[in-house]
């Protein structure tokens, strides 16, 4: 295999990285455009990835699978010393940081599920009383009538 700058051997082509990681080349290009992975170019202008890109891609995929937005994944990877590949210890630290956000999302979804069951039971979808459309009757303080629609003053 070609040698990358700095003496690193065993660089992976995009096809090899795709095959080994199970991630489509288009997704790898997307990750690279968004600063999640990086490549170097050969003399023939072909991308070559260091072998540690496999672990970074695995980290990205697992993070996405649990619902972490790409901007947060990038920030996590950028927080690592010298942009190194995440270790098991890094994953433990980052997952503790993300746990509160995930717990909040779970609580929101459980609340939505409870309200949805109630809404299906009544079937009214009342803008005045529906807990999905009008949580905690926040619209009641705006008075009667169509409070969600605001006319364009220039019309």
Image: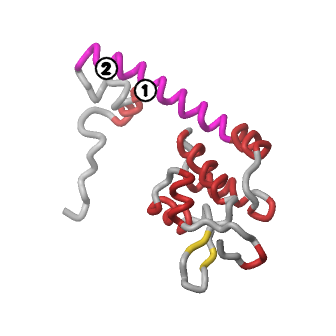
Q: Quadrant of residue 68?
A: top right
- Vertical relation: 109 (above or below) 44: above
- Closer to the camera in the image, 58 or 131: 58
Q: Which residue is drawn at 56% across and 74% down?
A: 47
- Closer to the camera in the image, 116 or 139: 116
Disc 1 secondary structure class:
helix
Q: Which residue lies furthest to the left in this view?
A: 155
Residue 130's tag is none
Q: Quick one: quadrant of the C terminus? A: bottom left
Name the residue carrying label 1.
Answer: 112
Q: Of marks 2 and 1, which one's residue comes earlier in the chain? A: 1
Q: Magenta span has 61?
A: no
Q: Is residue 44 shown left or right of residue 54?
A: left
Q: Quick one: quadrant of the N terminus? A: bottom right
Q: What stretch is highlighted in magenta?
A: 98-123
Q: Quadrant of residue 117?
A: top left
Residue 51: image location, x then y, percent: 68, 61
Q: Is residue 11 shown left or right of residue 46?
A: right
Q: Magenta span has 99?
A: yes
Q: How crowded is mark 2: few (under 14 residues within 10 Å), some or many (20 or more)?
A: some
Q: Is the magenta stretch mostly helix, strand or loop?
A: helix
Disc 2 secondary structure class:
helix
Q: Residue at x 61, y 61 (%)?
A: 36
Q: Residues within 10 Å of mark 1 (few under 14, many from 20)?
A: some
Name the colour scheme.
secondary structure
Name the residue carrying label 2.
Answer: 119
Mark 2 → mark 1, Cα distance in angstroms: 10 Å
Q: Which residue lies furthest to the bottom in this view?
A: 43
């Amino acid at each position: 295999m070609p040698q990358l700058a700095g003496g690193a051997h065993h660089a992976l082509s995009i096809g090899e990285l795709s095959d080994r990681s199970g991630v489509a080349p288009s997704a790898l290009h997307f990750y690279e455009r968004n600063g999640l992975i990086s490549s170097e170019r050969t003399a023939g202008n072909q991308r070559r990835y260091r072998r540690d890109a496999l672990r970074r891609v695995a980290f990205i995929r697992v993070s996405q699978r649990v619902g972490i937005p790409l901007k947060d994944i990038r920030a996590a990877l950028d927080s690592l010393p010298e942009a190194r590949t995440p270790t098991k210890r890094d994953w433990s630290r980052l997952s503790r940081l993300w746990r509160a956000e995930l717990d909040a999302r779970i609580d929101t979804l459980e609340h939505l599920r409870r309200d949805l069951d109630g809404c299906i039971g009544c079937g009214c979808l009342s803008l005045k009383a529906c807990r999905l459309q009008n949580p905690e009757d926040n619209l009641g303080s705006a008075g009667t009538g169509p409070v969600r629609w605001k006319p364009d003053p220039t019309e």
